[in-house]
Amino acid sequence: MSNETMVKYGLYIDGEMVAPSTGKWFDTTEPFSGTVWARIAKGAAEDADRAVESADAAFRAPEWRALTATQRGALLRRLGDLVRENADFLGAVEQRDNGKLITEVRGQVLNVAEWFYYYAGLADKVGGHVVPINKPGVFNYVKYEPLGVVAAITPWNSPLALTAWKLAPALAAGNTVVVKPSEYTSASLIELAKLATQAGLPPGVFNVVTGPGTEVGSALVAHPKTAKIAFTGGDAGGRAVSLAAAADFKPVTLELGGKSPNIVFEDADLDQAVLGVVSGIFGAAGQTCMAGSRLLVQSSIHDEVVDRLIGIVKSARIGDPSNPETQIGPIATRAQWQRILDYIEIAKSEGARCVAGGHALSGPGHGAGQFIAPTILTGVRNDMRIAQEEVFGPVLAVIPFDTEDDAIAIANDVRFGLAAGVWTRDLARALDCVDRIQAGTVWVNNYRSTSFTTPFGGMKHSGLGREGGVDAIKAYLQEKSVWMTPNPSRANPFVLG
Ligand code: NAD
């Protein structure tokens, strides 16, 4: 593709696509074929400033500020409709950019519409309340107000979905937003911004600034006019964002990584448990924050479970993610591909045994060869790096346990706390595990289920705050307590009223 015919995505500021102040552009590459398919604007701090100024002006302008919550909801519903109508197109753009299976991406895009519908419905249902105050002659009520300009920073694995998780509640609450997508997957966000304008969102309400995290992302976090930072990404980026935001006491929502345990007890329905383990670690080629990357399996069924897993991964259809029959797609970036291979070597050097995969895949059907064979490592101890660090790839670390107490101790002995799976037919044991596991989400006899109706987020180093569900809108609102005195009658101004 020549530079002249290639798609070019500018920044999206104030309701239109604009060139970056730097005059620089960078390539975005299709993970499967390895070809450059679009050029993305390389924004800088100056562009972040321009977008925040636009969002700040939009926040104060009557075109947005004077809308009722019901009217904001109507706009979000229209945006949801446009996402649905353009689902094939949006899915194709995103799939091209991050290499995820088209079947999964399309489902995610349809789900993005649902996020807009859900928070559209909630927009006019978050009321304040009158307080039965303990003082005579005064009337006190609490109202909710939007924060102002929200900066949303998102990763490459699910750009549209993870942006919608922030955008939908933030807009429903009446804020304006500047999104900084991953430099690897910016295109679908620009397409979403165009749809937002088409839906009738006033200019400046939703802006997108593309470019490097340490330049554009940092500038958004430090900008005096951003009121809140909603970040999804790795824990290193999350820590940098959190520390920088603290300098100005800005609230943050952090959705970070995980090293989630998928715990299989000997009384589980093994057919289902094995499928759940596969979906947990080999779905999205393991490039998902909620990956069940540690399989904790009761010793009595260890060999049987591992044999079944090997059987499934050996027959997995690995290849072109745009083919609906494909089950495992490529790794999104060359750097991530190398990182996964490095982790496999580290695991082997620590004594783990590779019983499936463990290598890259290339040749016919594997495009540019940015694939990793689904990998199963046995003989893993929980203190090994492969059991403690997030790989973000199709690599399963298998750790045996004897008793429920052992399983819980191993599950919790990690700095992350994003999610966990428990497979058992014993309801009392399941409930006990739910209580004892340190994770923001626990799936019992299922794995990787998510919904806009319920909170998602992490404990410990997996993050701060929750996205999804009714309460998530409160993360984009602040309370104001109002005191009204119909008949003022203060006698002594020198004592507290
Ligand atoms: P990343 O942390 O490298 O980047 C995420 C975003 O932050 C990108 O847009 C990047 O440009 C930006 N960024 C990086 N450093 C920054 C800084 N100092 N200041 C401001 N912005 C900065 O993550 P990634 O590699 O794109 O994504 C993979 C990570 O995301 C994994 O760790 C995964 O677990 C995590 N993730 C978490 C969830 C969740 O909901 N908990 C969901 C998806 C992905």
Image (spheres, helix red, strand yellow):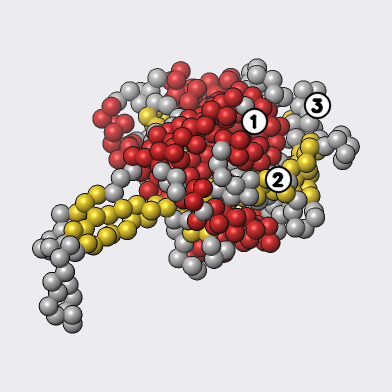
Is 301 or 458 nearer to us in this picture?
458
Q: Which mark is residue 426?
A: none
Q: Residue at x 48, y 23 (%)?
A: 274
* Residue 311 shows in the view: yes
Q: Residues within 10 Å of mark 2 (few under 14, many from 20)?
A: some
The residue where tag 2 is placed is 17
The residue where tag 1 is placed is 90
The residue where tag 3 is placed is 363
Q: Is residue 73 above or below residue 416?
A: above
Task: Classify residue 123 by image quadrant.
Answer: top left
Q: CA distance from mark 2 to mark 3?
A: 39 Å
The mark closer to the camera, 1 or 2, is 2
Q: Is residue 143 above or below residue 314?
A: below
Classify the position of the C terminus by image quarter. Answer: bottom left
Q: CA distance from mark 1 to mark 2?
A: 17 Å
Q: Is residue 493 above or below residue 323?
A: below
Q: Earlier in the sequence, mark 1 or mark 2?
A: 2
The mark closer to the camera, 2 or 3, is 2
| Residue type indicated by callout 1 | Leu
Classify the position of the N terminus by image quarter. Answer: top right
Left-right relation of 246 to 193:
left
Q: Residues within 10 Å of mark 1 (few under 14, many from 20)?
A: many
Residue lying furthest left in this view? Answer: 136
Left-right relation of 166 to 374:
left
SS state under label 3 = loop
Residue 449 percent across, percent down from the top left: 45, 30
Q: Are marks 2 and 3 in contact (CB under 8 Å)?
A: no
